[in-house]
Amino acid sequence: MRLSQDIFFKSTTMSPRTSESVVKRECAVKKTIKTMEDFSAFVGLSRPTVSKYFNDPNSVRKKTREIIEAAVKQSGFRPNIFAVNLNRRRTNILGIIIPNSTDPFYTALTRRIEGIAEQAGYLAFVLSSDGKPELEERAIETFKSMNVAGSIIAPLGVQSHQEKLLKLGESIPMIYVDSPLDTVSPFVGTNNRQSFQLIVDYLTRSGDAPCYFGMPPVNSNAFERREAYSEAMERLRLEPRIIEVEQTANWDFEKSAFDATIQILRNGGFPTKTVLCANDRVAFGVIAAAFQIGVKVGRGDDCDLRVAGHDDQPLSRYMCPPLTTVAQNYNEIGRLAAALLFHKLGEHQDAKFELPANERILLNAEIMLRMSA
Amino acid sequence: MRLSQDIFFKSTTMSPRTSESVVKRECAVKKTIKTMEDFSAFVGLSRPTVSKYFNDPNSVRKKTREIIEAAVKQSGFRPNIFAVNLNRRRTNILGIIIPNSTDPFYTALTRRIEGIAEQAGYLAFVLSSDGKPELEERAIETFKSMNVAGSIIAPLGVQSHQEKLLKLGESIPMIYVDSPLDTVSPFVGTNNRQSFQLIVDYLTRSGDAPCYFGMPPVNSNAFERREAYSEAMERLRLEPRIIEVEQTANWDFEKSAFDATIQILRNGGFPTKTVLCANDRVAFGVIAAAFQIGVKVGRGDDCDLRVAGHDDQPLSRYMCPPLTTVAQNYNEIGRLAAALLFHKLGEHQDAKFELPANERILLNAEIMLRMSA
DNA sequence: TCCAAAACTTGTCGCGCGTAAAGATTTATT
DNA sequence: AATAAATCTTTACGCGCGACAAGTTTTGGA
């Protein structure tokens, strides 16, 4: 055992290599171990070695690793995050920005990414732009001041301060999810064309052709999905019927859809007996309004209206009636966004990862047939 | 103007006090300002003065403040978060732990706290324990390694590693929300006794006395609410009727309630025509199951079953039928938790804040009468 | 047994900033 | 105009750790 003698408590009291009583040792642990210096004295190794371990456990000998791990378990020591990241070439922080922290779609996506990040040794820091471009900008600046290793962003789209985002993108790798910022930046999301063709096809075959109930123009999906609907309809040589909705970037989808539907149903109803909504939350509003007006939603003979959504929110299957929708694969979106980011960071990927040349990934969606349409 | 001459770009090229062309200045900005040293040279002030400004803008003269603020706006400079927090007595980070990141109740609460924290100059770091005690523990250790100034935690309760939490509580101020960790730690939450008395009273007056449909035992609310229901019933000299549900700590409330309800309705139905659920998400599951079985939910004469919830989730009003429930005031919970924390941190409070001696705050809930009961 | 490679050691520097002390300058007060 | 108070500047240190260099010990293979 090679222990320097200048730290009083070490050799006999604290080293896990000694066989002192656990009680006594734990006392010492609680009182003293604050820094990696303390900790390295505790384990009886030099600080650089311990530092190496924390940066890459495999960079030290197995025996050494086991000694350190035992000591970590015993003392609960963890390197100070600020000190670690102050002096690193690249921090181990990932920045995530979502536009709405109460929307289950984004929280589910976030959760997935957090998990992957943690496994890869990164800490995910999540900020919400809360639908406001200025908050999105603030979040970006926060991440810049944190020198994040990379960032995954679900942008506000048209409202986003594109220059700022692109400028940040120059200094750190950024991946966009959910809705693209532009036509060239790395992106992972759902193929709206495919998903809307899927649902339009189904609705058309099984009943009335759908009209389209849009979402507020909060991001580019609002436009893309409307276009995708129109294309799918034209492909079937049907005339698209788009319901005009309020064009303010309001994230309270349910409420605006509810209010609009009440108006519509009181003034002659929808142009067709089938309504395809831009997303599930819009559909929730439509269904609730129909219920309250007394219009029966569903695909039975006794029903007045079919309603379909898009996204497959966690609650969609528990609606009355359960919502027919298209499932966005947020697990895959999260996984691929993380994979794309790690690829740009030069991280080792477990599975073989085929990177599309243009760094843009569009995932297919899956139709969820339920009772609402 | 007192500018040291040892930094080439300063006086003529970069100082905002000079009247150089904006173009030229912006070039300089982009290229060079990385540290507070750079920035202080840019504004033509000393670094300690600039440092003082960032710690408390009011600690410098108004004129100085304006100069710095203009330069901040122009350069976008923000002090490196890691460096700032490495050397501070107390960091400006608040740690928030919630048990489920996809539950709108917690996300709404979190959002509120984030906003308040930001206004007070703190950065809220949110971690989810995802229902798992080991993740809750990890989160605590992460916060410890970040030396967070304070923490707001919605604990897993019985499952929580109480010792760890209490140990952390010794070194940093901690406030518990939603469900208490024990009977003495600072806490802000809803008064389950009051809220359940409210809804039980209402349900009893307006129809059948309710039976109680519990939530999985994920935290102490599960027990407290059941007790609160029983008390409210006994007060009315009615016999409590509690439906036995699966006793695993499963956060997929809707699914477990849905499955259980299907079973119940197929085997003779509920003991009474009114079901009071431990929370709204449970009620969602019950309502969905009733719908699919063909049992009509609502308070009309043509209805078979009344269902009430607790919490007033954002979607509750859009259920079919809209859910009668009790609204937890998460705005107030968030505000008071933050206020309590800031009080312990010795922060100045805007409004007068009456601190209860035992640091425990129970808020009354408000009944939301809708169509489901 | 010997030797080179691997793994460790000691020592030092600096990341970007907070903080404190001591001196210089500006501002407000009389 | 003179003086005190407020505000600034200069200088210096250290937070906890990553990174690197140079020296020492351990390890494993022939």
Image (cartoon, coloured by chain):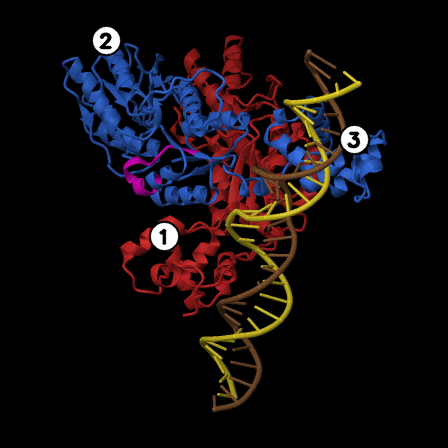
Chain colours: A blue, B red, C yellow, D brown
Q: Position of residue B225 (x, y in %)?
A: 60, 30
Within 10 Å of disc 1 (Cα), the crowding (few <14, some 14-19, many 20+) is many
Reply above or below: A231 against A185.
above
Identify residue for label 3: A16
Task: Residue A197: name its quadrant.
Answer: top left
Q: Is residue B226 above or below residue A329?
A: below
Q: Is residue B70 left or right of residue A272?
A: right
Q: Earlier in the sequence, mark 2 or mark 3?
A: 3
Classify mark 2: helix, strand or loop.
helix
Q: CA distance from mark 2 to mark 3?
A: 72 Å
Instruction: Using the image as rendered, state which of residue A298 and residue B83 is in the foreground.
Output: B83
Q: Nearer the viewer, mark 2 or mark 3?
A: 3
Q: Which residue is mark 1?
A: B29
* Callout 1 amino acid: Val
Per the model, the C-alpha gap separating discs 2 and 1 is 60 Å
- The image quadrant that residue A358 belongs to is top left
Range of residues picked out in magenta:
A151-165
- Is disc 1 on the same chain as disc 3? no
Q: Which mark is residue A205?
A: 2
Q: What chain letter is assigned to the residue under label 3? A: A
Residue under the point 85% across and 36% down: A12
**Disc 3: CA contacts within 10 A as few (<14), some (14-19) or many (>=20):** many
